[in-house]
Image (cartoon, helix red, strand yellow):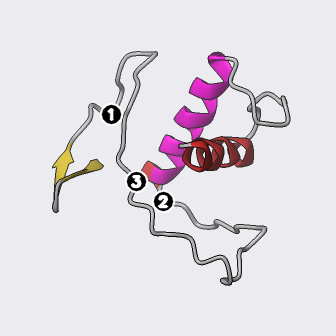
């Protein structure tokens, strides 16, 4: 299930459990203004992902790796942590 924000409403779209290779998913991510004085964490700990979350993370990592995606430091996306870093870099650059 992918949540999409359209205006002030959230809608849902169900994707096939086994979509074709090379599928691209676009999501809208709401970002708040940055409070420069606020604490900014340098780490994230994610544990106990459920099956859909684990599956999505694996598919994300595999897709980025297959596409030859690189992090800002030029390292290829090779791990789930790299995939999360890549996502954050895309948000930071947007």
Look at the image and give the residue range highlighted in magenta. Answer: 53-67
Mark 2 and mark 3 residues within 8 Å of each other at the beta carbon: no
Q: Position of residue 70 (x, y in %)?
A: 74, 28
Is residue 94 located in the magenta-colored stretch of the structure?
A: no
Q: How many marks?
A: 3
Q: Which mark is residue 50?
A: 2
- Residue linked to disc 3: 29
Q: Is residue 88 left or right of residue 27?
A: right
Q: Mark 1 vs mark 3: which is more N-terminal? A: 1
- The local secondary structure at tag 3 comes to loop
Q: Mark 2 vs mark 3: which is more N-terminal? A: 3
- The local secondary structure at tag 2 comes to loop
For the residue carrying disc 2, how many other residues have a C-alpha within 10 Å: few (<14), some (14-19), or many (20+)?
Answer: few
- The local secondary structure at tag 1 comes to loop
For the residue carrying disc 1, how many other residues have a C-alpha within 10 Å: few (<14), some (14-19), or many (20+)?
Answer: few
Question: Magenta stretch mostly in which secondary structure?
Answer: helix
Q: Position of residue 19 (x, y in %)?
A: 35, 23
- Residue linked to disc 1: 17
Q: Residue at x 36, y 43 (%)?
A: 27
Residue nearest the observer in this picture, 46 or 75: 75
Q: CA distance from mark 1 to mark 2?
A: 15 Å
Is residue 66 located in the magenta-colored stretch of the structure?
A: yes
Q: Residue at x 55, y 48 (%)?
A: 91
Q: CA distance from mark 1 to mark 3?
A: 23 Å
Q: Mark 1 vs mark 2: which is more N-terminal? A: 1
Mark 1 and mark 3 residues within 8 Å of each other at the beta carbon: no
Q: CA distance from mark 2 to mark 3?
A: 21 Å
Mark 1 and mark 2 residues within 8 Å of each other at the beta carbon: no
Q: In which quadrant of the rendered view does residue 80 lie?
A: top right
Above or below, comparing residue 34 to residue 61 in the picture: below
Q: In which quadrant of the rendered view does residue 67 lie?
A: top right
Tag nearer the camera, 1 or 3: 3
């Amino acid at each position: 299930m992918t949540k999409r924000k359209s205006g002030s409403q959230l809608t849902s779209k169900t994707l096939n459990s086994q979509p074709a290779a090379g599928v691209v998913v676009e999501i809208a991510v709401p970002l708040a203004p940055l409070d420069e004085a606020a604490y900014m964490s340098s780490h994230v700990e994610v544990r106990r992902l459920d099956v859909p979350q684990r599956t999505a993370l694996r598919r994300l990592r595999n897709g980025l790796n297959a596409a030859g995606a690189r992090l800002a430091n030029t390292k290829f996306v090779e791990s789930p942590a790299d995939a999360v870093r890549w996502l954050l870099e895309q948000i930071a650059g947007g």
